[in-house]
Image (spheres, rainbow, N blue to C red):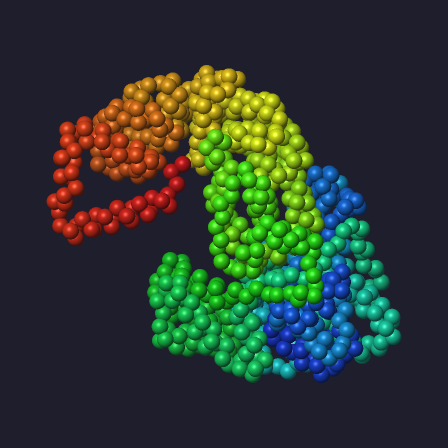
Amino acid sequence: MRNVLDAADLDVDALASQVDAVLNDDLYWFPVRHHSAAVARCLETVISERKPKVVFVEGPAEAQELIPFVTDSQTKPPIAIYSSYRDDNNVLGLAGIASPAADIPPRFGCWYPLLAYSPEYVAMQTANRIGADVIFIDLPHHALIKRSDKTSALPSSVSTDAPDTVDRKHSGHTPSDELIIESGFYQRLAEVAGYRSWNEAWDSLFEITNADAEQFRRELATFCLAARLTSDPRHIQNDGTLERERHFLKTIRETLSRRKLKPQQAMVVCGGFHLFLDRDDQTAPPPCPEGTVYTTVVPYSYFRISELSGYGAGNRAPQYYQTAWELMRSGREQDLLPEHVVALLKRARREGHATSAADGVAVTQHARMLAGLRGRATPILDDIEDAVITCCCKGNPDDEGVALRRAIDFINIGTKVGKVTSKLGRLPIVHDFFAQLSDLDFGEVLGHERLVKIELDKRKPDEERRSVFLHRLRFLEVPLAVLTEMPGTEASSGLLFRERWSLKWNPKIETHLVEQTLLGDSIEAAVLSKLHEMVATDSQHAGVTCAHLRRALDMDLPHLVVEVQAACGSAVDADAQFVSLGSALGHLVVIDRYAVYRNLRRTELADLILRCFDRACFALPDVASAPPEQHAGIISALQSLAELVLRGDRDDIDRNVFSSHVRTAAAQSTVPFLRGAFLGLLAELREITSDELAGHVASFAQTSADQMVFAGEFLEGVLAVSRTSVMLGAESLVAAIDQLLKVAEWNVFLTMLPRLRAAFERLHDRQVDSLAACVARKYGLTEHATDQLTELSTSVAAAALLADIDRRVAEIMRKWSFS
């Protein structure tokens, strides 16, 4: 270690002296790293032995009143303290910068997750057991929000993790971790020791140590000081570290003075980086801005804490370290390796990867060998994972090891969900959710992870209320209900009012509802706020804005409908994108059929539909040669316009305007798929005959091979939009395809074949049967003859092989995207 310190230009003696000064302070400081089981074990020992009167913990000061609920015996980690801030009066000047519009208050949320082995949680629990008070000393997260300088360009939706769990580089590390990783000391250490990641370095240095608590404290403090002294001071100044440390000092000093306690009667639990804060800093911490602050404790999950979920202060393997914590406390640390390997291989078998008892022995031995080669006394998670892949993956890990990697992730992360004591009560929005769940007779799904399917007819008042509630939850992304069948398009059939839903309880529901607290105190208020923000954000996009209008109707928000309807008009007039306008028209047509049922102003809707239709027609030629990734949207938009024209129930819809622009697009298009779609649509509109359409298909037979290969794409475009005209002109279409196939050389045919097959995959079974009958008639096959064709003239084995090939080809083609 000394050579590393020397290489980082650190004075070893001065470093040791500075560490001694802090560790020998009358106020006892203990360095921690979030979610470290080894740190938690040593911390528990120290608090139990020292028995301080007060334990200062790096936790959110605004959540001080929640500590009894965190330590309550009914509360079971994983849990999280949630703190949110809403700038109601725009005191930060961020309305319209950190929110979608100037009349929408900016909102900021912050999570402080806690595991059973998080040092902060263990400190609270141990302090509670010995009768010590716990004081949170961290600066409230909203005090770090920078005021507007009129040039800020923040995202429209801002949500943060805890101040020391914000990931500046989105790499799964806290700012303190990032400062350590970027330090000259750590960089040199990783180079010398060969550490491939910060997690590997931490586990090697601290997670598997046998040092006693005081030795561990000194080693971790020395490490953190070396990292701090070689970190970029600009990062420390810019990431809120200094402001938070000033709040640490202020809270500690004021508490000791107010309670008339000596420093020896207290101890501080904080990130190791903060141990060496400037104790002579006289600058006051920043004040908290005025606004609405909510704090609560909610159940959390291992997955949300894991790095796979994207959480900034992620723990890469919550379940693995939980097992390590439990074994550590029972004196069975040596059992961690075999227990984890056995669990992992069992899961691998469930994922479809064959493993055996021999594999378990091999993995265990290999992990120990790797640990020895890497200079570790015992294997860490990296050694185990490398051993599993080496011993159990028979091929490329990216291919043959997919199931194995799934098993590794599953066992490392775990599935545990926490529980919070009922003594805490519920936030208003959570209370509103459960009240409505009961009132609307959804009690059958409450707390039971059993799938419940329901069908609703929105013409019945009670069922309409249930539908509105489910649509609101769906809009807020509360994981309770899935709309499995959308309403139809015809009011006369009754299908316009029928919905099918699947409901299943999810333990993440309450946590998700808590996140919506910033939007409002009830489900309806949250929906109104969120939709209002989305309308403001999407004001220039006609398709999205009209979708919002449809949502407002589904969620029964009459006051917002007027606002959104006006926004739709502005969006339609501002948007020049064909796909967006076509999408908007589709939504407006459905809304129009709802009009009477929802007491909408049909005159304004009719005008909006006409404006949208006209603008979409004029925008159509602009997409004549659009790239493949836009084709699906173009086809959908074309179908929306064509449906409105073909219905023929509106005198103000000019069929000729649409037809002429489709014809123009067909003439300009250089993309076979789109040209086929445009011509197919003209045939559907009876602007060209079926024979003319077939002639365009047959014309590919007269082209060179490099052009002929596009015949499949052209035909797929035709069949994407044309149904009736193709069936009416089936004879001529079959003849055109027959002509094409006769002249195509083998290689050309093989190139065309996937797109030809994809074209016919777009047809319904009845349409395929109709075309097949045309083929049979063309070749003079009678019904009796076609029956004979089903008799195999080959062996059963060969027929089975052909069937298997056909099945595998079909599976491959389902993964292909042709538009």
The quadrant of the picture occupied by the C terminus is: top left
What residue lies at 44% left-to-right and 35% top-to-bottom? 632
The residue closer to the viewer here, 143 or 498, is 498
What residue lies at 49% left-to-right and 53% top-to-bottom? 452
Lateral position of residue 640 relative to residue 45, left or right: left
Residue 588 seen in render: no
Please provide percent x and percent y for residue 805: 25, 48
Lateral position of residue 702 relative to residue 176, left or right: left
Judge whether 604 appears above or below 816 on screen: above
What residue lies at 51% left-to-right and 17% top-to-bottom? 651
Please provide percent x and percent y for residue 661: 46, 20
What residue lies at 64% left-to-right and 44% top-to-bottom? 527
Judge whether 88 appears above or below 263 on screen: above
Lateral position of residue 719 relative to residue 217, left or right: left
Judge whether 668 appears above or below 478 on screen: above
Which quadrant of the view contains residue 459? top right
The residue closer to the viewer here, 724 or 515, is 724
The quadrant of the picture occupied by the N terminus is: bottom right
Judge whether 238 appears above or below 777 on screen: below
